[in-house]
Amino acid sequence: MSDKQYRDPDEVRREQGIDAPMDKKSKVERLKAGSDGLRGNVREEMLDPEAPAVSNDSYQLMKHFGMYQQDDRDTRKERRRAGLDKDYSFMVRTKVPGGLLTADQYLTLDDIAVRHSKGSLRLTTRQTIQFHGVGKEKLCSLVRDLNRELMNSYGACGDVVRNTMSCPVIDIDPDPRWAGRGVFRELTRQISDRYLPRSTAFYDVFIDGERQDELGSKIKLRDEREDIYGETYMPRKFKIGVTIPEDNCVDIFSQDLGLVALIEDGEVQGYNVLAGGGLGFTHGKEDTYPRLATPVAFASTRDVLYAVEAVVTIQRDYGNRVNRKRARLKYVLDELGPQWFHEEMVRRTGGRVEPARPIAPERWEMPDHLGWHEQKQSGLFYAGIFIENGRIVDKPGDPMRANLRKIVERFRPQVRITPQQNLILCNVSAKHRREMDAMLRDSGFSTKVKRGGLSELRRHEMACVALPTCGLALSESERVMPGIIGRLEEMGFGKERVSIRISGCPNSCSRPNMSEIGIIGRAPNKFNLYVGGDFEGTRLNQLLHENIVTEDLAPRIGGLLRRWKQERREGEAFGDWSLRAGVDALREVPPIGTRG
Ligand code: SRM
Ligand code: SF4
């Protein structure tokens, strides 16, 4: 039992301004409360042809519609010198629960990329798709196109429950240990639907208050009361994932709320509920930190949605509404403690939860689902294909986006997005498998993950978007990662199974704090380097070096990989070795290029 002293819930509520008058709360809290269900002036500002950008208030509200106002940071200086305003546009993030798309939906998203954005589809670490460079004047037609295929971007960002994650092959993989998992697909959908905002603001603003239904008819929508969210929504973003220990591809310990199904003899016994994961922090601010989710309860399959509602509403009622830097559920858990949290869940569910059940550490695995696999019971196949850092875009001499489109048009597979920013094409018949494989290979996609093709090291890389679109980026990420991996491959480390993730700032969108080697941007061209996480994503890594310049990253990492290969015990993974060696000793390891 920890001897940490936890605080009195009433005192916490007072200090965090939860019961305080509105003027004591953060600006965003006041904005949400006065926004008429997130509407504010968004429609007027968006339709104003004279204004190149929307106001800060509208920008904050539009996040709830899955839209971020951004500008091209590559051209900022040049434009300032020329006396021009920033080059504004929007990033639009779709909502794709569990990463599941039909072929038609994928093709519509591909059309949108070409017609309304800068031509790329960006698969994200939460299984959604982002478009960058969308002009303000194109937002309405983009939403209309999404809606025609029954998709939307409502709630993909903002202070609500974000895209709900689950393993993309949860219902089709034939691994016998995973029997009974079909139910998770339904659970993911139920959670996603339950926590969509009830306000019709999104539809009112973009498509005149109408939504298309499954049969293609237009439905006029009626505003409903926000029964869960109230007028101020959540204190901050809220993230949910569903998994089993044998398949932690969703990085369950990084979620605000994780449901871990426990299966015995092919039957789901229920779910361990994990709460308070979150990875973002600010360099130099010790009261912000990454945190792994804590097991707080067990709920039967019948009661699991009560447990979810309890966790969501605890965060709604106890999350900090004064300081947005401390507003995530992880801080509630650390202030009030897991015991209080469990008791509060018991109270809110009417006794429907029990203490969390133990899970043996060795059960955790993190498959990435790449390559060809047979599907459960159906005799069909799926192909997991590697998309470097999730960017699907045509380049001179490499029309990758167009080729993928042709493949989806030809075979009409179901398309699924993985939490590692890759793509899965499902329901391929034995007859079509060879033809599709040839088309994939001719287009430069690698399905040969075991024998040659993609290097093992590259296969497990992950990078966040960062420059030039992300307004919070302190350094590069997606644009430098392929080169860093390339240099490590040249040094001879391509065959090593090590997870390396990079992010352009400590918000940690590529979950770099959960990988064996983490690289986190600190300033332009400077990064902190972390080691000691595990491949399975069950522990956080630790700071090893600060302020490494981009050019020195590969030699530094190469030096560590070389030392690991010399010293590792049989079968010892890099992360486990680096934890055993300890960061103090590893600081002395010379980079490659020096004698070591
Ligand atoms: Fe993230 C903010 C991109 C997953 C933690 N994230 C942003 C913004 C919207 C920047 C902004 O606020 O202006 C980035 C847009 C960049 C761009 O130009 O596209 C951005 N985050 C991403 C994506 C696209 C990264 C990727 O390369 O795939 C991921 C989209 C997920 C999705 O589809 O919903 C993405 N972000 C994550 C994750 C990982 C996850 O959720 O599994 C995290 C760490 C987990 C967590 O939340 O603790 C993450 N993003 C953040 C944070 C820090 C939040 C915090 O409370 O600590 C911010 C900044 C903020 O919210 O203030 C942020
Ligand atoms: Fe932007 Fe930072 Fe997220 Fe990267 S980690 S996308 S730089 S907010």
Image (cartoon, rainbow, N blue to C red):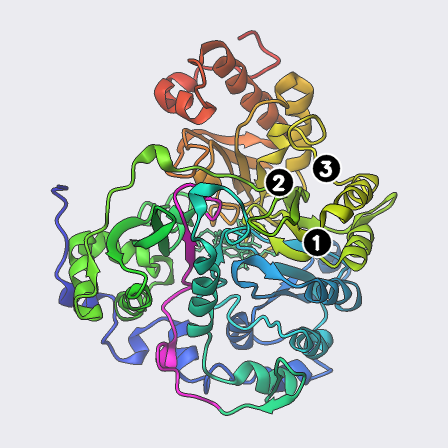
- Judging depth in this view, the residue of 195 and 278 nearest the camera is 195
User: For mark 1, what is the residue?
Assistant: 77
User: For mark 2, what is the residue?
Assistant: 370
Badge 1: how crowded within 10 Å, few (<14), some, or many (20+)?
Answer: few
Eyeballing the image, is 465 above or below 30? above
Badge 2: how crowded within 10 Å, few (<14), some, or many (20+)?
Answer: many
- Judging depth in this view, the residue of 64 and 101 nearest the camera is 101
Residue furthest to the top = 595
Image location (x, y in percent) of residue 374: 61, 43
Distance from disc 1 to disc 2, alpha carbons, whole Å, reads: 41 Å
Residue furthest to the right = 397
Eyeballing the image, is 370 above or below 491? below
Label 2 SS: loop
* Range covered by the magenta-colored residues: 223-250
Distance from disc 2 to disc 3, alpha carbons, whole Å, reads: 9 Å
User: For mark 3, what is the residue?
Assistant: 446
Distance from disc 3 to disc 1, alpha carbons, whole Å, reads: 39 Å
Q: Verify whether residue 6 appears in magenta.
A: no
- Dividing the image into 4 quarters, which one contains the N terminus? top left
Task: Name the residue type under label 1.
Answer: Lys
Q: Earlier in the sequence, mark 2 or mark 3?
A: 2
